[in-house]
Image (spheres, rainbow, N blue to C red):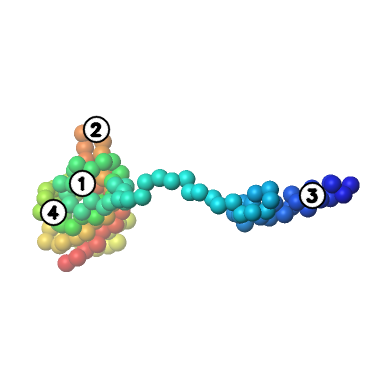
Amino acid sequence: MKAILLASVLSLTSVSVLANNHLVSADGQPVVQQHKGGFQGPSKSKRIIRDVISAINASDDTKVELTGHLTMSLGDDDYIFQDETGEITVEIDDDIWFGRIVTPEHTIIIRGEVEKDWNNIAIDTDSLEVVQ
């Protein structure tokens, strides 16, 4: 009976110790956890593309923040966006406009993602900011 009681107390103690993310050996000494390891350094996935030429060459779903001008409407939600490095099609949904009027003379910043299909590269716009 004493052995069962002692085993119960020990198991409850170890559960609370493990719940606190602490490991102890059988003799009660703390066990030092070693990190799994891995790469620490720059990551391509966190890089934001800032010009059209880089966006054209980027992978699908790459984040972009482009500064330039809308030069033409292609109909529906598609427009031609241009900066000093080139031009690209951007898709700007109606809810992104917030009632603002933008002309080719306005400088804007669009934030979104590269959207690549078999024969088409575009930017799916998440937000639009009018600079001037």
Separation of marks 4 and 3 at Cα, in angstroms: 71 Å
Neighbor class of circle 3 (other Cα within 10 Å; few <14, some 14-19, many 20+) is few
Separation of marks 2 and 1 at Cα, in angstroms: 16 Å
Task: Name the residue nearer the viewer: 8 or 91.
Answer: 8
| Residue 126 in view here | yes
Neighbor class of circle 4 (other Cα within 10 Å; few <14, some 14-19, many 20+) is some
Q: Which residue is mark 2?
A: 118
Nearer to us: label 3 or label 2: 3
Q: Is residue 66 left or right of residue 33?
A: left
x and y percentages locating residue 125 in the rendered image: 27, 51
- Residue 83's tag is 4
Q: Which residue is mark 1?
A: 55
Separation of marks 1 and 3 at Cα, in angstroms: 62 Å
Secondary structure found at label 3: helix
x and y percentages locating residue 69 in the rendered image: 15, 56
The residue under the point 50% across, 49% down is 34
Separation of marks 2 and 4 at Cα, in angstroms: 24 Å
Tell me the amino acid under the disc marked 1: Ala
| Residue 76 in view here | no
Nearer to us: label 4 or label 3: 3
Q: Is residue 52 left or right of residue 98?
A: left
The residue under the point 11% across, 48% down is 86
x and y percentages locating residue 62 in the rendered image: 28, 46
Tell me the amino acid under the disc marked 3: Ser
Tell me the amino acid under the disc marked 2: Trp
Nearer to us: label 1 or label 3: 3
Q: Which residue is mark 3?
A: 8
